[in-house]
Amino acid sequence: TDLRWRAPRGGLALRFDVTEMAGYDIFILARDGAGADYAPETVAKARALFDDMDGEAAARLENNLIAGLPGGEGRYTRETLRAEIATYEGLGHAEVQANLIRFLEHVVPVAEELGLKLTLHPDDPPWSLFGLPRVVCGPEDLRTIFAAVPSPANGMVLCTGSYGARSDFDPVAVVQEFGSRIHFAHLRNVQREPDGSFYESDHLDGSIDMVAAIKALLAEEDRRRRVGEEPAQIPIRPDHGHLLADDIQKDRINPGYSCIGRLKGLAELRGVAAALTHGQDWAVKA
């Protein structure tokens, strides 16, 4: 809901505010039945927020929410968003998940033939928005999907930021249960707030124990080496980063995708990995 939120240390970060989301959904988009999807206290706060919101603030919020993804062309207007939402009428979580499984049943055999491994990214955030069903929100969904299509080529992205918006996310437990399925790791951190809001924190701060997550991933890599499972190394990315220094002044820098912020995150993540593997013959090289 905010693409340039001032983080505690001064950088600009992405922030999801539940009250702002509810205010847009209920009072600006005016989606049918939207009020029932939020807690009564959230609706009351959203009503007060909307009553005090001027046209410029409402337009900025709408642009933040429906502007589309970096690198994509999927921008919406209020009318086209309503039309897209309408196409999901009658579809719930079970139906959408079944569609995904049918898709995987077709493409996973092709991936096997080509020696490829597919990586499924979780919903972000991992709960319903605009009343739409979600399909990959946590371990319960992963168990269903992997049981339906058990091939090792049917894998996952461990996105600590997406899963981490959930208060029950345990990165170590996820790695221990699904380690052999993790073919890519997106390492970012979020600071959760009591009402469900969150913002992207520094990589080593926030609600997620990033050191424990990296330690678990390194242990999974070590397991693969010992049993001869290839590839042993799990690719990672310093997923997202704050706008820092002169990146703040540059044009066409997408929120979360700044060079300096992600390099800072990469240095921190590699530093943790190097410390955890120090002295081992396969240690992370500087």
Image (cartoon, helix red, strand yellow):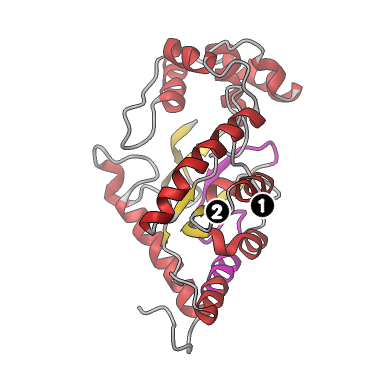
The quadrant of the picture occupied by the C terminus is bottom left
Q: Residue at x 54, y 79 (%)?
A: 227
Up-down relation of residue 198 to residue 47 (above or below): below
Q: Quadrant of residue 78?
A: top left
Expressed as whole percent of the image width and height from the top left, the position of residue 74 reads 36, 26
State how far apart marks 1 and 2 are (Cα): 9 Å
Q: Residue at x 39, y 67 (%)?
A: 267
Task: Identify the residue position indicated by label 1 in the image.
Answer: 169
Task: Identify the residue position indicated by label 2 in the image.
Answer: 160
Q: Tell me where the magenta segment starts and ends, as one range.
A: 194-218
Which residue type carries mark 2?
Thr
> Seen in the image, is 185 located left or right of residue 76?
right
Task: Of the two numbered discs 1 and 2 on the same chain, state the one appearing first in sequence.
Answer: 2
Does the magenta segment cover residue 252?
no
- Under circle 1, the secondary element is loop
- For residue 241, say whether it is visible: no
Residues packed near mark 1 inside 10 Å, few (<14), some (14 to 19) or many (20 plus): some
Nearest the viewer among 39 and 246 is 39
Expressed as whole percent of the image width and height from the top left, the position of residue 214 reads 54, 67
Up-down relation of residue 141 to residue 228 (above or below): above
